[in-house]
Image (cartoon, rainbow, N blue to C red):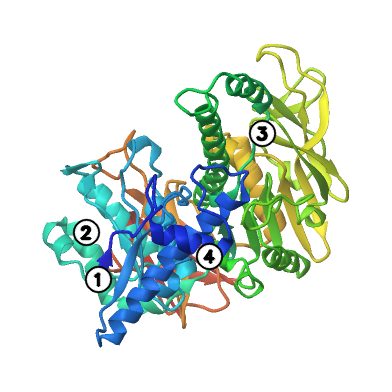
Amino acid sequence: MIFLDGPAYYPGACYCKHCRSMFEQEHGFPIPLREDWRDPVWRRFIIFRYSSIARFLKDGQRKLREKGFETLLYSNNSGQVWPSWSFALSAEDSYDGQSIIGMESYQYYTLPNSVPVWFQGWTTKLANSIKREKPFCLFLAASHQPWFRQRIPEVEYLLGKVQGLANGADMFEDHGFAREATEEGKRFFDTARKYEDYYQQAESDARVALVWSRRTGDFFFEIPPQAGIEEAQARVEMEKPATIGVQAGDFLEAQRIAAWKFESEKKTVEEARGFYEALLRLHVPFDLISDLNVNSEDLKKYSLVILPNVACMSSRQVESVRSFVESGGGLVATYKTSMFDETGYRRNSPALSEVFGVSVEDKVIGPLRWDYMIIKKEHELVSGVPQFKTTPEGLRILPSPEFVLQTTVSTGLPVCLQLEPAPARYGDLTPETGFPTIVASEFRGGKAVYFPCTFAGQYWNNGFLDYLKIIENSVKWAGGSVSDFETDAPETVEITVFRGGGYRMLHLVNFTYALRRPFNRVFPVENISFKIRSKEEPRIVKALTLEKSLEWSFKEGFLRFVLPKLGLYETLLIEY
């Protein structure tokens, strides 16, 4: 087996004569030397970088076969919750040149509190949407990077591994881990090996698809609302005399473009993270799918698709989503979804505007640091919202998202409206803008909830429980019955659901840990009850790690049972 840790691009690369010549032959322009997302040639260079690595891996596979080797060749890819254009690491683009799909998902390459504890589950879910018939390997590190001699706590290492099991990673014999692991860890993987056929033959039973769009992360670029002042400052700088042959404003211009790109990426990442965490807390089974899966065939298995600022979509992807909703599917989308094509070129309006029931200008209000929106219409989307405040005037207000698109409602229902930006946090409430922040729409056979704002990103950053309830309502209203089970498990327990021939598997991962990361203990949870809709009575209900058959009852189409104790991880097998 040949494992390449990379190949990848790095800052300042690659400008060798071969790449220069090949790029100019393919595109008719020299390779651009400066990052500029407004330049179409720069965008072509990003695509060229991905295709260069894919070509390298395919050539490597071909050479090995020509020499008679059956060696597996694969390259380390990124499962990160951040765009990867700077390194051009993409399992999607390099798929044909790899024998297996490998993604790294290390606990710490940055400050611990900025790393989601569910990171390894994210990576595994994403890989499952990409791998098709190829096996997937989840790469973990036992070290607290960048201090590679410092180990992370054993429980965190194990927690990363069981997230792989719970979300469908292929299991490889890991002798190094077996020598060093705790007895608890050995028991998990001994159990998985014992029931290996059940693990391997089961497929995700999720009816909700959350899209992580690598292409949006790569190509989404917006100039922020406050950029007018920066533009004026830049013009002043650029009018200054040149120094050592370099225009004085060039460096400032490059810095501004890089900063705008970072903020654009941040919006995409935070929208996706917000929905991911909310679905975990709500115990809604879901898949994380890639751009490749936004097609009519792959979407058929779902009741609901969530597009968290999936701004960059091809015409084919747009049509697939439109057809999905027309056929009775549910859609939840935010901010500038479908505003651009797959390489970031702006459309006149979002391609899914008709589905959303709105018309949208590419004008943004924000950043809104202490502002409010009001609940304008009675609707299921705002039912049971726990903490809104009613003003003396009778207005029901909620904190507003940070950025709001100027949107006009056509066929949809404006459930919430944005108030004018307030000059100070303690002032009087400002008037309505007329621009909605939540729109409910019924489009032919299906339903859509459109947030023309950074709604899930605001939830990710501030954790408003009102927002969590609205996300829950949106999933239920647009998606209908997206889960067959109810549970009183705490929100710190991830639950994934898989189905095989004649059986179901529920995987439980316990994130109930101490005040902060790193941590060396996960606190057990006791007496978790389940109520599961079922067409037939089961033969067996068993907690595999506990090696315990559970007492259960079956009445009126519902299976009920209680899991007496959950440590770090458990698998529930329901066999019919």
Question: Residue at label 2?
Answer: 185
- Is there CB contact under 8 Å for labels 1 and 3? no
Q: Which of marks 4 and 1 is in front?
A: 4
Q: Residue 326 location in percent, x, y?
A: 78, 67
Q: Which amino acid does label 4 sit on?
A: Gln
Q: What residue type is labelled 2?
A: Gly
Question: Residue at label 3?
Answer: 403
Label 1: state its secondary structure. strand
Q: Is residue 270 above or below residue 16?
A: above
Q: Residue 555 location in percent, x, y?
A: 56, 71
Q: Which of 38 and 125 is in front in this view?
A: 38
Q: Which amino acid does label 3 sit on?
A: Phe
Q: Nearer the viewer, mark 3 or mark 4?
A: 4
Question: Residue at label 1?
Answer: 2
- Is there CB contact under 8 Å for labels 3 and 2? no
Q: Nearer the viewer, mark 1 or mark 3?
A: 1
- Circle nearer the N terminus (4, 2): 4
Q: Which numbered dot is residue 291?
A: none
- Circle nearer the N terminus (1, 2): 1
Q: Residue furthest front?
A: 245
- Label 4 to label 2, Cα distance in Å? 54 Å
Badge 2 density bin: few <14, some 14–19, many ≥20, Cα 10 Å: many
Q: Nearer the viewer, mark 4 or mark 2?
A: 4
Label 4: state its secondary structure. helix
Label 3: state its secondary structure. loop
